[in-house]
Image (spheres, rainbow, N blue to C red):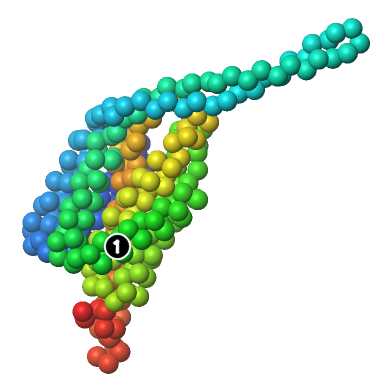
Amino acid sequence: MTLKIVVLIASVNALLTTAYTVLYLNLSLSSYVAVTAAFLSTLLSNLLGKFNIRVGNLKLSSELRKASIIKLSNDYLVQSLRFKALQNIVVELNLGGVVMPLIISMLILTHISTYYGVVPLLTSLLLIIASTLIINRVSVVIKGLGLAVPVIVVSTVTSLLSLLVTVSTAQWVGLGIHYSYLVAYTSTLLGVDLMNISKISFYDARRLIIGGLKVYDALSIVPAASTVITYLITTALYTYLNAKPISHVCLFLTA
């Protein structure tokens, strides 16, 4: 195993553990419980990443045209043939790359609905719609590999969008962290994987694994990175504002 691979593995798992710790602390768990749960979540993600579950088949049909030229004496007859090609693709979900982040997202969604009510839920929906459209625009198809997005750019945009909406609507600042993970995961799943399914015929796929890169997939990394970025920005704001006179402290940070 090369040094680059070791660094990659360590970096991704450190990112996941940090993001899970932030999320669990934001769910009002104690420090010990949050850190322990974060390590177990990262470990479980790696273990589940070894397994895929088949969820069905995807049938894509596309109309193809073929022209043929027939010479009749001195005249040419152009004959156009039209036919449909059917592509049958097996669709699978990776348990570590899709299901584990989905469980975390459902936990966050349940927490928001239970403790904060309808307005944050509607805010989450609007953020997901906006973020999905943005992410879909920057996603690309890489022939022979699959669908991809610029992770740092997408994570930063999702984080800033979540914080901006949280501040502008005067909601509790901790919701920004909840939004970051939930919105980043859902919009990546919708904007990258589901909205681009028809494009997989471009590279003649016979098998589609959503979350196929396991914990290294965008579905796992983007929400984790977005959460950490939001936490760092929030911490920096607290540090800066606490150094100012109390009259300068924004109300949304003391709500």
Q: Residue furthest top?
A: 73
Residue shown at 53% from the left, 31% from the top: 202
Measured as percent of width and height from the top left, residue 160 is found at: 38, 66
170 to 152, vertically: above or below: below
**Res 70 → quadrant:** top right
* Element assignment for label 1: helix
Residue 82 lies left or right of residue 255; in this view the side is: right
Answer yes or no: is residue 209 visible: yes
The number of numbered discs placed on residues in the rendered structure image is 1
Residue shown at 27% from the left, 79% from the top: 252
* Residue nearer the viewer, 42 or 177: 177
Say what amino acid the circle numbered 1 marks: Leu
Residue 17 lies left or right of residue 188; in this view the side is: left
121 to 104, vertically: above or below: below
Residue shown at 20% from the left, 46% from the top: 103
Please name the residue that numbered disc 1 is placed on: 122
118 to 73, vertically: above or below: below
149 to 52, vertically: above or below: below
Measured as percent of width and height from the top left, residue 141 is found at: 50, 39
Measured as percent of width and height from the top left, residue 77 is found at: 81, 15
* Residue nearer the viewer, 66 or 157: 66
**Res 215 → quadrant:** top left
Mark 1 crowdedness (10 Å alpha carbons): few <14, some 14-19, many ≥20: few
Residue shown at 84% from the left, 14% from the top: 76
* Residue nearer the viewer, 105 or 88: 88
Q: Pick the quarter of the image with the N terminus.
A: top left
Answer yes or no: is residue 226 visible: no
